[in-house]
Amino acid sequence: MNFNIISYEDKYLNQVLDLLNSVFDFHYTEDYINTGLSEKYVVLENGKVIGFFEFSILSDLGEIFMIAVDKNFHGKGIGKVIMEFILEKMKEENVKEIYLDVSVNNKRAINFYKKYGFEELYIREKYYRNLEDAILMKKQL
Ligand SMILES: CC(C)(COP(=O)(O)OP(=O)(O)OC[C@H]1O[C@@H](n2cnc3c(N)ncnc32)[C@H](O)[C@@H]1OP(=O)(O)O)[C@@H](O)C(=O)NCCC(=O)NCCS
């Protein structure tokens, strides 16, 4: 597959919203994308958005807010490339600990994160707006 990762730009807004709304139950709007200080990236295949991810680095703490890959491209190694990209950036910036939240019901994502060394810390009850519980996960670098 021939894809590349670039920083998010406004021109990708609609494609990113379509992607997020197709893989998550929550309804995402422009406000979500334009709020917060996270670093945002898209994965492009022939100019089309097939992935989106965001994270932040604050001193030696990293947080992954979201990784989303187009359903048609699941299981093809794109999540792996995204994770390697994030880990590389965080190592460059001397991050020591990375945190993320994932829904307890999202078994595929939990497996995905465990594969890259994230460990379950504890459950945050009713963490999401739909009242699903989240698992807080942590990886030491
Ligand atoms: C989770 C997600 C990002 C993984 O991306 P992907 O491109 O499908 O993942 P990859 O093909 O790179 O797989 C990487 C590893 O993840 C794990 N994994 C991926 N899909 C899996 C599945 N269906 N079941 C179990 N493990 C899985 C495997 O360990 C896999 O490694 P392997 O192929 O060597 O066994 C993707 O499924 C996704 O976007 N899901 C919807 C959005 C989401 O839930 N995001 C995470 C919460 S923010």
Image (cartoon, rainbow, N blue to C red):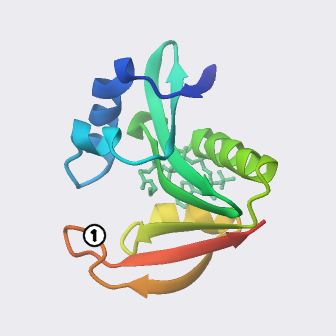
Residue drawn 75% across and 66% down? 96
Residue drawn 72% across and 45% down? 89
Q: How many marks?
A: 1
- According to the image, label 1 marks what residue? 128
Q: Is residue 80 left or right of residue 18?
A: right
Q: Quadrant of residue 19?
A: top left
65 w.r.t. 129: above or below:
above
76 w.r.t. 123: above or below:
above
Q: Is residue 134 left or right of residue 122?
A: left
Neighbor class of circle 1 (other Cα within 10 Å; few <14, some 14-19, many 20+) is: some
Q: Nearer the viewer, residue 32 or 83?
A: 32
Q: Residue furthest front?
A: 59
Residue drawn 67% across and 40% down? 81
What element does badge 1 sit on?
A: loop
- The amino acid beneath tag 1 is Tyr
Q: Nearer the viewer, residue 93 or 131?
A: 93
Q: Is residue 91 left or right of residue 136?
A: right
Q: Is mark 1 within 8 Å of ligand 1?
A: no
139 w.r.t. 64: above or below:
below
**Considering the image in quadrants, where does the N terminus appear?**
top right
Percent from the top left, x then y, of residue 42? 50, 30
Percent from the top left, x then y, of residue 30? 24, 36
Residue drawn 60% across and 22% down? 3
Q: Nearer the viewer, residue 5 or 70?
A: 5
Percent from the top left, x then y, of residue 2? 63, 19
